[in-house]
Amino acid sequence: MTALRLREVTAGYGKRPAVRDVTATVDGGGWFAIVGPNGAGKSTLLKAIAGLVGFQGSIAVHDREFSALSRRQRARELGYAPQDPLLPTGLTVTDYVLLGRTPHLGTLARESRADLSIVDDTLGRLDLRGLAARRLGTLSGGELQRAVLARVLAQRTRLLLLDEPTTGLDIGHAQALLDRLDRLRREDGTTVVTTLHDLTFAAQYADTLLLLDDGEVVASGPPGEVLTAERLRRHYAADVEILTTATGHPVVAPVRGQSAADPR
């Protein structure tokens, strides 16, 4: 089943669109990563998919045109976590994660036992039960990122949109978060769409990469096909080598510039 389909999507805030004519298809249960240099339009494209930015073209979620869905229906179809979410630091982790159940509640309705059970299960799966009563303002960066992911997972949607989920995390915490996300994706059959700055992480976890530059698609496909040294030199102005792990995944290794190596 197709989880997400984009056809000639153009989106942005001003007169000049930030992304132009993006066409892509994401299979159900896959991991699709949007990559590109700073200012390429990655976050704008993700916001357009989430319905937070106006767009032209067509976006369909699980074969339903997004424009035909109500806000509540959209919230039940996909979960979105921005790069810098507004966090009510006085809320406990449990209360924050409960916000993910809002699309499933009626007007003025309170959460049910089923909602509380879903939240407890989500906390357990992300190893947050021990922090359930802690206030968000007391958490470390890695703990906060897990809490944000838990809120989105509590929506119980089939499609997750995550904008730079590893922002501010060191390599160990970033790897742990992505490993958890990958495990949950496989267990639940959830489709994951992320933006990622780290190209090696993107290549390790995503099935398909969409490379944007200046708002336009310059490459799309498996990581090994998209990430070439020549392409990264052209679009990132970076000198790199593409290495390969024992499991066959690409690794993007920066190459020290000649000017830095020359003591003169």
Image (cartoon, helix red, strand yellow):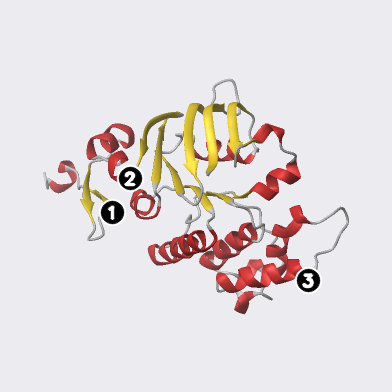
Q: From the viewer's perspective, is 51 left or right of 21?
A: right
Q: Which amino acid does label 1 sit on?
A: His
Q: From the viewer's perspective, is 54 left or right of 244?
A: right
In this rendering, the answer to whether 243 lies above or below 62 is below
Local secondary structure at mark 1: loop
Residue highlighted by disc 2: 223
Q: What residue type is labelled 3?
A: Arg
Pointer 2 or 3: first along the chain: 3
Local secondary structure at mark 3: helix
Residue closest to the far front: 1
> Distance of mark 3 from mark 1, alpha carbons?
43 Å
Residue highlighted by disc 3: 113
Q: From the viewer's perspective, is 104 left or right of 187?
A: right
Pointer 3 or 1: first along the chain: 3
Pointer 2 or 1: first along the chain: 2
**Quadrant in which the C terminus is drawn:** top left
